[in-house]
Image: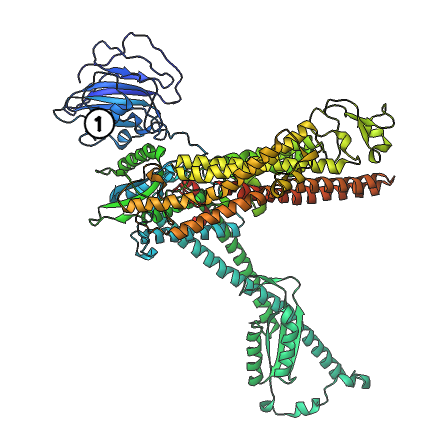
C-alpha cells in the first residue's frame, strides 16, 4: 500500500479507556523488502473512538461494535479495518504488556465485508489465515516480540482486508464464587525447541493444571530426569551457601521483587552459566573453609601445646627447685634429724647401683577433658598398679577441641612411669579418653625456645585466619546478594522440568504432547502465552492448542481473594466441592461469623477481638513477608474471619445488652420500674430480685434486651426461653436454605428426579414439622400467648385429633396440624420409592433402545457414575436411597436439636462472664487494699483473656464449624471434588527445592 493513511477532519467522540498504553497503527509495503512507512494513525489509549474514521486518501475504516460481548466474556471496543494488498504487512505497535492487551490486537486477514464486523465475523476470518501468523522481515527480536508488535503478511496474490480488534477480549471474565469456574480439558502439541519456554510462560500465567501423561514411568525413566537432577544439585549448593552465610553471622539480601511469579532479574540469568558459576563458587568456598578448618585445628593444637608448656613447665620447674634445695642442704650438712623423713630410704643403695642397671623414668604430657579427668586418673592407677605418678593442672579458660571445634574445659596432665610396657599402657589409655598428647622437652632452655616458637606461630595463624575469614565473608556477601535470585531461578527451572516430565513425547521426538485443565475464560490468555513462547524460542512452528471432550470430572476452581479465601478454606476443610455445584462458601461469609456471634454475644469481648483483628489486617503486609509460627500463621490467615466474627459479636452483644456481663442503658431507659415504688428507677429497686418489677409503659426497649432483666428474679428463665426459640428459628432457616440450594443444584445439572423426589419431599417434611414450630414461636411472641409449645408438638403426633384447649394459638390449628402431619408422613415414601423405581425403568428402556423423554436423559444415574454401560444394581440403588431417606428424617430432628447449642454456648458464655465479673473483680473492689484490688484485676484480666477470649472463642468457632458442616452443608453439598492446582511460579515455596 503506497497511499498514506492520514487522519481526517471528522470530530472525535471519546470516553475513558482502561488501558494505559498508547497504540499506533502503521501500514507498510515490504514488496521489495524496502520498508516505506506511511504516516501512522495514532490512537491514544486514553480515548475510545466511537465513530467510523473517514480518511481522504485511504479506505481504512474504524468500526465500533458497541461494546459487543465476545465468546470469552470480554468486550470488543472497536475494530480497525484496513485494505491489504499482496505482500503488505500490517503492524500494530506499542501494544503494551502481553497480559494487558495480548493477541486481541493481532490482525485478522480475510475477505472484505461491507458491514461493521462483529466478533463472530472476525472469529470466522481468523480461520482463513495463511502462512505464518507473524512474519519475520529482518526485524530484531524485540520488534517481533508480540508483547511489542504484531505483524502479519498478506499471502501472495490475495487481496484481503486486515482487522485489528481493540477491546477486552483477552481479559478473563469475572469469576463467580457461587459456582466453580467452568473448566476445559485442553491438549497442547508443543515443538521440542519451544517446550521449555512454553511451560515457563504458562507457569507465569498460572492458569493451567497439567496432567501426568507418564504415570507408569519412575522419576528416573523420564525424559528430563537429568535436568531435574541438575537443578536439585544446584539447589543443594544454594542451601549449602545459605547455611554457610547463616553460620558466618551474615544476612542474605532481601528476596527479589516477584510479579506473577517472576523475579525482576532472573530473566537475565542463564541456567548453564549459573550451574558453572555455582560449581566454581562451591569449589572456592569449600577450599576456603577447608583451609580455615585446618588452620583452626592447628591453632587449637598450638593453644593446647602452649598450655602444656606453661603448666608442665611449672611442674618441672618446681621439682627442679625442690631438688636443688635438697642437694644444697645435703652438701651443707644442714639436714637435721627432723628432716631425714623427707630423704629417700634407699638413697644410699640407689647411689651404689651401677649406672647401666638404673631405670630411667619416662613421662607423657598432654590435655584431657575436665569431665574425664577423674576417670582418667583412676584407669591409669589400675592399669599400672600404682606404678605411676600423675600431675594435673586445670586450664583457666575453655579451649577449642581440635577434633570437634567446640569449646571444652580441659586439664593439663603429666604422667610419670617406668618402663616401655607402662608407656604403651599410658598411650592407649590417652587415646581411649580422647586425651591429646604433646611433646615436652626436659631442658629449660629448650622449653623457652619452644614457647617462643609456639607464640610466634599462634600470632601468624591468627593473622592468617583473620585474612581468610575476611576473604570468606567477602565471598559469602557476594553470594548473598544474588542468593535469593538464584534460588528463585533454580526453583522455577526445577518446577518447569518436573512439569515437562509429565508430558508425553511424540514418536518422532520433535514435539511434546501436554494435557491439562484450564478455565474456559482463560483460554485466550493461554493462547497468548503460547504465541509469546513460540517467538521467544524462535520456533518455526507454533504450539497447537485444542479442547478435548471428556467425561472426566474437572477440578473445582474458585477465584478467591484474601477476604474470601479464608471462608473458602473453611468449606474445603470439609471437602472440596464437586465441579460446578453450589458453593456454601458464599453463604458462610455471613452465616459463619453470625452463628459464632450468637454464641459469643458480648460487645466488650467483641471489641477486644476487633482490635486484635484490625491489628492483623493493618499489618498484613508486614506479616505476609515473614515466616510465622503455626498458631500465628493460622490466626493471620483467618484475620478477616476474626474481623467479621468480632463485628457480629458486637452486634449480638448489643442485642443481649452485655458488656463483660454488665448491662448499659445505651438505647434509652428501661420500660420497667419498682413494684412497690414506681417513682424509683429499676436499678435502685431492692425488690427486683424478690417480687420482681412491673412494666411502666407499653413501648418495648428500642434495641436489644431491656437492661432491667439483668439481675432480676426471672432473668434466667426469660433469656433461656428467648435464646432457645431464637436458636430454633435460626436453625430451621439455615436448613431450609440448604435444601433450597439442592433445588438449584438439581436445576443446574438438569436432574428433575432430584428436584421432584428429593427437594420437594424434603422441604415439605421439614416445613410441616419444624417450619410449623417456627411459625408457632413467632405467633406466640406476637400474641403474648401462654401456650406450651412442647405440649403442642408432642400431642401433634400422639393425639392429633384432641382439643388443644389453652394451647391453641389460632383458629383451625388442629386441622392445620392434621394436614401438616399427613404431609410429613407422605413425604417419607415420596423420598424413598419413586426415584429408584424410575431409575430402574429408565435402565430397562435404555437397554431396549428407547429413551425416557418425560424426565430427560440427564437423570440417568448409576452407582459409579454416568457411564451408560455400567451395570445397574436396583438393590444397591434402593438401599442407597433408603439410607438417604432415613438419614434425612432422623437428621431433621437431630439437626434441629443440634442448633440448641447456640443457646447453650451463649448461656455458658454469659454465666462465665458474670462469675468472673461478680466473684473476682467486684469482690476485690470491695476491699480498700490497693494490692488486693490490683490482684483481683489481674486475675479477672487473665481469666477473661484465657477462658473467654481464647477457650470460648475456640469453642464457639468449632461449634459454628460443626453447624455448617453437618447441619447445613449435608443438605446439598457433595464435597467429593478435587481442587484446581495450576502450575504457577507464584505458588512455589522453599520446600519445592
Position in image of residue 749 (x %, y %)? 39, 37
Q: Nearer the viewer, residue 873 or 711?
A: 873
Please identify the quarter of the rendering in which residue 445 is found.
Answer: bottom right
Q: Residue at x 30, y 44 (%)?
A: 845
Specify whether residue 789 is in view.
yes
Q: Which residue is mark 1?
A: 152
Q: Residue at x 68, y 92 (%)?
A: 349
Residue 145 placement, left or right of 485: left
Q: Is residue 387 above or below residue 971?
A: below
> Residue at (56%, 40%) from the top-left corner?
636
Which quarter of the image is occupied by the N terminus? top left
Q: Nearer the viewer, residue 335 or 235?
A: 235
- Residue 374 in which image quadrant: bottom right
Q: Nearer the viewer, residue 519 or 840?
A: 840
Q: Please say whether residue 613 is visible from this viewpoint.
A: no
Residue 407 shown left or right of residue 785 in the figure: left
Q: Position of residue 570 (x, y in %)?
A: 52, 42
Taking 685 as reference, is 903 left or right?
left
* Left or right relative to 880: residue 322: right
Q: Secondary structure at mark 1?
A: strand
Badge 1: few (under 14), some or many (20 or more) residues near its Cα, within 10 Å? many
Residue 266, image quadrant: top left
Residue 866 placement (x, y as % from top left): 34, 45
Amino acid at each position: 500500500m503506497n497511499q498514506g493513511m492520514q487522519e481526517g477532519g471528522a470530530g472525535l467522540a471519546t470516553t475513558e479507556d482502561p488501558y494505559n498504553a498508547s497504540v499506533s497503527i502503521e501500514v507498510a509495503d515490504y514488496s521489495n523488502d524496502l520498508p516505506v512507512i506511511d504516516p501512522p494513525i495514532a490512537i491514544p489509549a486514553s480515548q475510545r473512538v466511537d465513530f467510523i474514521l473517514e480518511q481522504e486518501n485511504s479506505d481504512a475504516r474504524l468500526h465500533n461494535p458497541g461494546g459487543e460481548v465476545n465468546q470469552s466474556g470480554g468486550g470488543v471496543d472497536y475494530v480497525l479495518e484496513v485494505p491489504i494488498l499482496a505482500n503488505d504487512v500490517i503492524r500494530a505497535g506499542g501494544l503494551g504488556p502481553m497480559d494487558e492487551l495480548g493477541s486481541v490486537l493481532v490482525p485478522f486477514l480475510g475477505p472484505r465485508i461491507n458491514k461493521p464486523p462483529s466478533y463472530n465475523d472476525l472469529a470466522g476470518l481468523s480461520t482463513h489465515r495463511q502462512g505464518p501468523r507473524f512474519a519475520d522481515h529482518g526485524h530484531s527480536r524485540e520488534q517481533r516480540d508480540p508483547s511489542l508488535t504484531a505483524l502479519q503478511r498478506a499471502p501472495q496474490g490475495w487481496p484481503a482486508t486486515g482487522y485489528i480488534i481493540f477491546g477486552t477480549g483477552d481479559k478473563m471474565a469475572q469469576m463467580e464464587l457461587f459456582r466453580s469456574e467452568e473448566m476445559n480439558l485442553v491438549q497442547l502439541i508443543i515443538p521440542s525447541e519451544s517446550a521449555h519456554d512454553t511451560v515457563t510462560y504458562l507457569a507465569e500465567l498460572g492458569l493451567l493444571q497439567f496432567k501426568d501423561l507418564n504415570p507408569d514411568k519412575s522419576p528416573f525413566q523420564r525424559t528430563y530426569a537429568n535436568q531435574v537432577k541438575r537443578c536439585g544439585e544446584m539447589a543443594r549448593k544454594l542451601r549449602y551457601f545459605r547455611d554457610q552465610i547463616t553460620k558466618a553471622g551474615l544476612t542474605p539480601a532481601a528476596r527479589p521483587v516477584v510479579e506473577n511469579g517472576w523475579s525482576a532479574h532472573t530473566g537475565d540469568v542463564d541456567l548453564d552459566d549459573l550451574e558453572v558459576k555455582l560449581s566454581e563458587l562451591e569449589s572456592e568456598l569449600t577450599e576456603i573453609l577447608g583451609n580455615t578448618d585446618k588452620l583452626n585445628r592447628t591453632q587449637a593444637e598450638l593453644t593446647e601445646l602452649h598450655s602444656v608448656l606453661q603448666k608442665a613447665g611449672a611442674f618441672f620447674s618446681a621439682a627442679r627447685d625442690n631438688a636443688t634445695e635438697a642437694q644444697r642442704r645435703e652438701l651443707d650438712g644442714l639436714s637435721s634429724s627432723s628432716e631425714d623423713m623427707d630423704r629417700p630410704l634407699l638413697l644410699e643403695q640407689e647411689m651404689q647401683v651401677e649406672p647401666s642397671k638404673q631405670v630411667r623414668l619416662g613421662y607423657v604430657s598432654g590435655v584431657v577433658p575436665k569431665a574425664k579427668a577423674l576417670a582418667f586418673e583412676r584407669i591409669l592407677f589400675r592399669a599400672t598398679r600404682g606404678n605411676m605418678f600423675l600431675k594435673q593442672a586445670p586450664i583457666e579458660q575453655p579451649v577449642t577441641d581440635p577434633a570437634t571445634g567446640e569449646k571444652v574445659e580441659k586439664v593439663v596432665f603429666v604422667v610419670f612411669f617406668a618402663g616401655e610396657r607402662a608407656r604403651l599402657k599410658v598411650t592407649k589409655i590417652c587415646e581411649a579418653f580422647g586425651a591429646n598428647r604433646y611433646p615436652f622437652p626436659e631442658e629449660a632452655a629448650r622449653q623457652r625456645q619452644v614457647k617462643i616458637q609456639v607464640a610466634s606461630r599462634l600470632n601468624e595463624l591468627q593473622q592468617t585466619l583473620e585474612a581468610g575469614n575476611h576473604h570468606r565473608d567477602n565471598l559469602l556477601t557476594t553470594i548473598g546478594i544474588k542468593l535469593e535470585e538464584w534460588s528463585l531461578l533454580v526453583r522455577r527451572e526445577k518446577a518447569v522440568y518436573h512439569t515437562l516430565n509429565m508430558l508425553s513425547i511424540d514418536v518422532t521426538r520433535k514435539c511434546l504432547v501436554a494435557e491439562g485443565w484450564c478455565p474456559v475464560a482463560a483460554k485466550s490468555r493461554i493462547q497468548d502465552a503460547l504465541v509469546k513462547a513460540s517467538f521467544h524460542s524462535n520456533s518455526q512452528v507454533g504450539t497447537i492448542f485444542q479442547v478435548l471432550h471428556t467425561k472426566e470430572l474437572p477440578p473445582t476452581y474458585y477465584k478467591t481473594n484474601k477476604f474470601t479465601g479464608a471462608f473458602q478454606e473453611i468449606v474445603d476443610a470439609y471437602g472440596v466441592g464437586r465441579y460446578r455445584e453450589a458453593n456454601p462458601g458464599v453463604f458462610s461469609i455471613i452465616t459463619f461469623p453470625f452463628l459464632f456471634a450468637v454464641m459469643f454475644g458480648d460487645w466488650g469481648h467483641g471489641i477486644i477481638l476487633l482490635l486484635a483483628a484490625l491489628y492483623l489486617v493493618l499489618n498484613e503486609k508486614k506479616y505476609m513477608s515473614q515466616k510465622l509460627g503455626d498458631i500465628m500463621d493460622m490466626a493471620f490467615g483467618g484475620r478477616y474471619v476474626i474481623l467479621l466474627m468480632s463485628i457480629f459479636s458486637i452486634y449480638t452483644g448489643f442485642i443481649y445488652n452485655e458488656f463483660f456481663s454488665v448491662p448499659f442503658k445505651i438505647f434509652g431507659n428501661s420500660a420497667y420500674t419498682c413494684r412497690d415504688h414506681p417513682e424509683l428507677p429499676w436499678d435502685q429497686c431492692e425488690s427486683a430480685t424478690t417480687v420482681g418489677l412491673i412494666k411502666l409503659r407499653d413501648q418495648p426497649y428500642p434495641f436489644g434486651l431491656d437492661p432491667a432483666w439483668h439481675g432480676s428474679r426471672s432473668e434466667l428463665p426469660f433469656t433461656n426461653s428467648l435464646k432457645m426459640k431464637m436458636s430454633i428459628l435460626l436453625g430451621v432457616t439455615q436448613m431450609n436454605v440448604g435444601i433450597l440450594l439442592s433445588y438449584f443444584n438439581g436445576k443446574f445439572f438438569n436432574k428433575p428426579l432430584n428436584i421432584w423426589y428429593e427437594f420437594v419431599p424434603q422441604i415439605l417434611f421439614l416445613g410441616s414439622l419444624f417450619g410449623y414450630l417456627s411459625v408457632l414461636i413467632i405467633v406466640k411472641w406476637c400474641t403474648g400467648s401462654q401456650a406450651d409449645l412442647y405440649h403442642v408438638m408432642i400431642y401433634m403426633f400422639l393425639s392429633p385429633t384432641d382439643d388443644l384447649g389453652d394451647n391453641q394459638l389460632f383458629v383451625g390449628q388442629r386441622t392445620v396440624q392434621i394436614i401438616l402431619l399427613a404431609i410429613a408422613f407422605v413425604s417419607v415414601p415420596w423420598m424413598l420409592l419413586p426415584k429408584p423405581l424410575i431409575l430402574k425403568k429408565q435402565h430397562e428402556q435404555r437397554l431396549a433402545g428407547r429413551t425416557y423423554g418425560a424426565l430427560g436423559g440427564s437423570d440417568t444415574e448409576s452407582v459409579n457414575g454416568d457411564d451408560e454401560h455400567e451395570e445397574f444394581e436396583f438393590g444397591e440403588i434402593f438401599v442407597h436411597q433408603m439410607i438417604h431417606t432415613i438419614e434425612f428424617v432422623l437428621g431433621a430432628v437431630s439437626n434441629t436439636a443440634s442448633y440448641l447449642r447456640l443457646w447453650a454456648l451463649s448461656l455458658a458464655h454469659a454465666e462465665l462472664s458474670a462469675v468472673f465479673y461478680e466473684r473476682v473483680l467486684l469482690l476485690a473492689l470491695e476491699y480498700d487494699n490497693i494490692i488486693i484490688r490490683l490482684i483481683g484485676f489481674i486475675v479477672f484480666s487473665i481469666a477473661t483473656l484465657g477462658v473467654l477470649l481464647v477457650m470460648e472463642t475456640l469453642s464457639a468457632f468449632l461449634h459454628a464449624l460443626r453447624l455448617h458442616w453437618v447441619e447445613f452443608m449435608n443438605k446439598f453439598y457433595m464435597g467429593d471434588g478435587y481442587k484446581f492446582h495450576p502450575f504457577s511460579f507464584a505458588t512455589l515455596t522453599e520446600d519445592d527445592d
